[in-house]
Image (cartoon, rainbow, N blue to C red):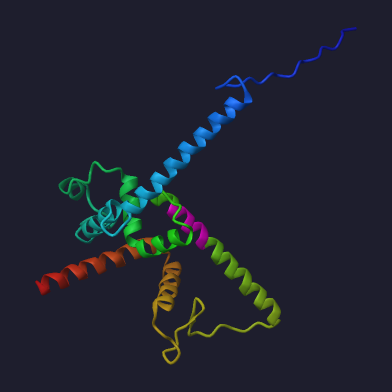
Amino acid sequence: MKTATTTNPTTITPTTGTTIKQDAAEGKAIAKLIKARTAKGIKAFAADTAENGMDTRLGTLLLKLMTESSSKSGFATKVQLKTNNLDTIDRRDRSDAIWFATNRAEAIAFNTDNGGRFTTISTLQQAMVKATKEAAKEAADTEADDSDQDGSETEADDSVIGGIDTDSSNFTFDENTMAAFIKEQCDQQGINIAKVLIKLDALRIADAATQAKKAA
Protein backbone atom coordinates (compact mmCIF):
# COMPACT_ATOMS: atom_id res chain seq x y z
CA MET A 1 0.00 0.00 0.00
CA LYS A 2 1.44 3.34 -1.07
CA THR A 3 1.61 6.16 1.39
CA ALA A 4 -0.17 9.33 0.21
CA THR A 5 2.16 12.24 -0.37
CA THR A 6 1.32 15.77 0.69
CA THR A 7 2.12 18.83 -1.41
CA ASN A 8 3.56 21.80 0.36
CA PRO A 9 1.79 25.11 -0.34
CA THR A 10 3.51 27.32 -2.91
CA THR A 11 5.52 30.10 -1.38
CA ILE A 12 4.90 33.44 -3.08
CA THR A 13 7.93 35.66 -3.03
CA PRO A 14 7.99 39.40 -3.72
CA THR A 15 8.98 40.22 -7.31
CA THR A 16 10.16 43.78 -6.71
CA GLY A 17 11.10 43.99 -3.07
CA THR A 18 12.09 41.88 -0.14
CA THR A 19 9.25 42.96 2.14
CA ILE A 20 5.53 43.72 1.92
CA LYS A 21 6.33 47.33 2.83
CA GLN A 22 8.66 47.69 -0.14
CA ASP A 23 6.09 46.18 -2.50
CA ALA A 24 3.42 48.51 -1.14
CA ALA A 25 5.69 51.47 -1.81
CA GLU A 26 6.28 50.24 -5.38
CA GLY A 27 2.52 49.86 -5.92
CA LYS A 28 1.91 53.38 -4.66
CA ALA A 29 4.56 54.77 -7.02
CA ILE A 30 3.07 52.92 -10.00
CA ALA A 31 -0.46 54.15 -9.18
CA LYS A 32 0.87 57.72 -9.02
CA LEU A 33 2.53 57.37 -12.43
CA ILE A 34 -0.65 55.94 -13.99
CA LYS A 35 -2.73 58.75 -12.50
CA ALA A 36 -0.34 61.32 -13.96
CA ARG A 37 -0.44 59.60 -17.36
CA THR A 38 -4.27 59.57 -17.31
CA ALA A 39 -4.37 63.26 -16.38
CA LYS A 40 -1.96 64.02 -19.23
CA GLY A 41 -4.12 61.98 -21.62
CA ILE A 42 -7.28 63.83 -20.59
CA LYS A 43 -5.55 67.18 -21.11
CA ALA A 44 -4.22 66.13 -24.52
CA PHE A 45 -7.64 64.81 -25.56
CA ALA A 46 -9.28 68.11 -24.61
CA ALA A 47 -6.75 69.98 -26.75
CA ASP A 48 -7.09 67.62 -29.73
CA THR A 49 -10.90 67.85 -29.71
CA ALA A 50 -11.11 71.62 -29.19
CA GLU A 51 -12.51 73.81 -31.97
CA ASN A 52 -9.08 74.11 -33.59
CA GLY A 53 -7.75 70.82 -32.22
CA MET A 54 -5.99 68.16 -34.26
CA ASP A 55 -8.87 65.67 -34.40
CA THR A 56 -11.44 68.36 -35.14
CA ARG A 57 -9.34 69.76 -37.99
CA LEU A 58 -8.67 66.28 -39.39
CA GLY A 59 -12.33 65.29 -39.30
CA THR A 60 -13.44 68.57 -40.86
CA LEU A 61 -10.95 68.22 -43.72
CA LEU A 62 -11.95 64.62 -44.36
CA LEU A 63 -15.63 65.56 -44.43
CA LYS A 64 -14.83 68.26 -47.00
CA LEU A 65 -12.94 65.75 -49.15
CA MET A 66 -15.91 63.40 -48.92
CA THR A 67 -18.14 66.01 -50.55
CA GLU A 68 -15.67 66.12 -53.45
CA SER A 69 -15.11 62.35 -53.61
CA SER A 70 -15.88 60.28 -56.70
CA SER A 71 -15.88 57.06 -54.67
CA LYS A 72 -19.14 55.08 -54.49
CA SER A 73 -18.52 54.58 -50.77
CA GLY A 74 -18.69 58.31 -50.25
CA PHE A 75 -15.33 58.42 -48.48
CA ALA A 76 -12.19 60.18 -49.67
CA THR A 77 -10.29 58.32 -52.39
CA LYS A 78 -6.66 57.18 -52.11
CA VAL A 79 -5.67 59.92 -54.53
CA GLN A 80 -7.36 62.57 -52.39
CA LEU A 81 -5.70 61.26 -49.25
CA LYS A 82 -2.25 61.26 -50.87
CA THR A 83 -2.73 64.66 -52.49
CA ASN A 84 -3.72 66.17 -49.15
CA ASN A 85 -0.95 64.39 -47.18
CA LEU A 86 -3.41 62.28 -45.20
CA ASP A 87 -2.42 58.87 -46.55
CA THR A 88 0.15 58.30 -43.79
CA ILE A 89 -2.44 58.79 -41.04
CA ASP A 90 -3.78 55.52 -39.64
CA ARG A 91 -7.16 54.57 -41.07
CA ARG A 92 -8.64 54.15 -37.58
CA ASP A 93 -7.55 57.66 -36.64
CA ARG A 94 -9.17 59.03 -39.78
CA SER A 95 -12.38 57.13 -39.05
CA ASP A 96 -12.44 58.37 -35.44
CA ALA A 97 -11.88 61.95 -36.60
CA ILE A 98 -14.76 61.76 -39.09
CA TRP A 99 -17.07 60.40 -36.41
CA PHE A 100 -16.02 63.08 -33.94
CA ALA A 101 -16.35 65.96 -36.41
CA THR A 102 -19.82 64.69 -37.33
CA ASN A 103 -20.96 64.29 -33.71
CA ARG A 104 -18.75 66.89 -32.02
CA ALA A 105 -21.44 68.80 -30.11
CA GLU A 106 -23.03 65.64 -28.71
CA ALA A 107 -19.64 64.05 -27.97
CA ILE A 108 -18.34 67.06 -26.04
CA ALA A 109 -21.59 67.32 -24.09
CA PHE A 110 -21.45 63.62 -23.21
CA ASN A 111 -17.81 63.85 -22.14
CA THR A 112 -18.57 66.89 -19.98
CA ASP A 113 -21.58 65.19 -18.37
CA ASN A 114 -19.31 62.26 -17.50
CA GLY A 115 -16.64 64.34 -15.81
CA GLY A 116 -14.40 64.80 -18.85
CA ARG A 117 -12.72 61.47 -18.14
CA PHE A 118 -12.19 60.21 -21.69
CA THR A 119 -8.76 60.15 -23.31
CA THR A 120 -9.55 58.77 -26.79
CA ILE A 121 -12.31 59.20 -29.35
CA SER A 122 -12.88 55.45 -29.63
CA THR A 123 -13.58 54.99 -25.91
CA LEU A 124 -15.87 58.02 -25.95
CA GLN A 125 -17.76 56.64 -28.94
CA GLN A 126 -18.14 53.22 -27.30
CA ALA A 127 -19.48 54.82 -24.12
CA MET A 128 -21.99 56.89 -26.08
CA VAL A 129 -23.20 53.84 -28.01
CA LYS A 130 -23.60 51.93 -24.75
CA ALA A 131 -25.48 54.81 -23.12
CA THR A 132 -27.78 55.09 -26.15
CA LYS A 133 -28.59 51.37 -26.02
CA GLU A 134 -29.28 51.53 -22.29
CA ALA A 135 -31.51 54.57 -22.72
CA ALA A 136 -33.42 52.85 -25.54
CA LYS A 137 -33.88 49.73 -23.43
CA GLU A 138 -35.09 51.79 -20.49
CA ALA A 139 -37.53 53.66 -22.73
CA ALA A 140 -38.80 50.38 -24.17
CA ASP A 141 -39.26 48.92 -20.68
CA THR A 142 -41.12 52.04 -19.56
CA GLU A 143 -43.36 51.92 -22.63
CA ALA A 144 -44.09 48.25 -21.99
CA ASP A 145 -44.97 48.99 -18.37
CA ASP A 146 -47.29 51.81 -19.41
CA SER A 147 -48.94 49.52 -21.97
CA ASP A 148 -49.52 46.82 -19.34
CA GLN A 149 -51.04 49.34 -16.95
CA ASP A 150 -53.34 50.67 -19.65
CA GLY A 151 -54.80 47.19 -20.17
CA SER A 152 -56.04 47.98 -23.65
CA GLU A 153 -54.65 47.86 -27.18
CA THR A 154 -55.24 50.51 -29.78
CA GLU A 155 -54.39 50.39 -33.46
CA ALA A 156 -51.72 52.87 -34.54
CA ASP A 157 -52.96 55.72 -36.68
CA ASP A 158 -51.58 55.81 -40.23
CA SER A 159 -50.17 59.27 -39.53
CA VAL A 160 -47.94 58.00 -36.72
CA ILE A 161 -44.41 56.93 -37.69
CA GLY A 162 -42.03 55.73 -35.02
CA GLY A 163 -44.18 57.29 -32.31
CA ILE A 164 -44.18 60.65 -34.09
CA ASP A 165 -47.49 62.08 -35.28
CA THR A 166 -46.91 63.18 -38.88
CA ASP A 167 -50.39 64.59 -39.43
CA SER A 168 -49.77 68.06 -40.90
CA SER A 169 -52.19 69.57 -38.41
CA ASN A 170 -50.27 68.15 -35.43
CA PHE A 171 -46.71 67.59 -36.69
CA THR A 172 -44.12 70.09 -35.48
CA PHE A 173 -40.76 70.10 -37.23
CA ASP A 174 -37.89 70.35 -34.77
CA GLU A 175 -34.62 68.49 -34.08
CA ASN A 176 -36.29 65.68 -32.11
CA THR A 177 -39.14 64.91 -34.50
CA MET A 178 -36.91 65.17 -37.56
CA ALA A 179 -34.29 62.86 -35.99
CA ALA A 180 -36.98 60.30 -35.13
CA PHE A 181 -38.44 60.51 -38.64
CA ILE A 182 -35.03 60.03 -40.31
CA LYS A 183 -34.20 57.07 -38.06
CA GLU A 184 -37.55 55.44 -38.83
CA GLN A 185 -37.02 55.83 -42.57
CA CYS A 186 -33.47 54.47 -42.38
CA ASP A 187 -34.67 51.43 -40.43
CA GLN A 188 -37.43 50.76 -42.94
CA GLN A 189 -35.14 51.07 -45.96
CA GLY A 190 -32.19 49.23 -44.40
CA ILE A 191 -29.93 52.27 -44.68
CA ASN A 192 -26.98 52.85 -42.33
CA ILE A 193 -27.99 55.95 -40.37
CA ALA A 194 -24.37 56.74 -39.49
CA LYS A 195 -23.55 57.19 -43.18
CA VAL A 196 -26.63 59.36 -43.62
CA LEU A 197 -25.47 61.60 -40.78
CA ILE A 198 -22.02 61.89 -42.35
CA LYS A 199 -23.61 62.82 -45.67
CA LEU A 200 -25.84 65.42 -44.01
CA ASP A 201 -22.89 67.04 -42.26
CA ALA A 202 -20.89 66.95 -45.48
CA LEU A 203 -23.75 68.76 -47.23
CA ARG A 204 -23.82 71.33 -44.43
CA ILE A 205 -20.09 71.99 -44.80
CA ALA A 206 -20.36 72.22 -48.60
CA ASP A 207 -23.28 74.66 -48.28
CA ALA A 208 -21.32 76.79 -45.80
CA ALA A 209 -18.37 76.85 -48.21
CA THR A 210 -20.66 77.92 -51.07
CA GLN A 211 -22.16 80.70 -48.98
CA ALA A 212 -18.69 81.87 -47.97
CA LYS A 213 -17.62 82.05 -51.63
CA LYS A 214 -20.72 84.08 -52.51
CA ALA A 215 -20.06 86.48 -49.65
CA ALA A 216 -16.39 86.91 -50.63
Decide which of 201, 77 is in the foreground and name it. Answer: 201
Image quadrant occupied by the N terminus: top right
Decide which of 78, 55 is in the foreground and name it. Answer: 55
Q: Give coordinates of residue 104: x percent, y percent.
A: 35, 61
Q: Give coordinates of residue 143: x percent, y percent.
A: 61, 74
**Magenta-drawn stretch contains 188:** no
The answer, for residue 106, to whether it is visible in the render is yes
Q: Is residue 181 above or below residue 103?
A: below
Q: Main secondary structure of the magenta part?
A: helix
The answer, for residue 192, to whether it is visible in the render is no
Decide which of 205, 46 is in the foreground and name it. Answer: 46
Residue positioned 51% across, 78% down in the render = 163
Q: Residue furthest bottom?
A: 169
Q: Give coordinates of residue 167: x percent, y percent.
A: 45, 88
Residue positioned 58% across, 25% down in the render = 22
Q: Is residue 204 above or below residue 157?
A: above
Q: Quadrant of residue 172?
A: bottom left
Residue positioned 20% across, 70% down in the render = 208
Q: Quadrant of residue 60?
A: bottom left
Q: Is residue 139 above or below residue 9?
A: below
Image quadrant occupied by the C terminus: bottom left
Q: Give coordinates of residue 117: x percent, y percent.
A: 46, 52
Magenta segment range? 124-132
Decide which of 144, 102 is in the foreground and name it. Answer: 102
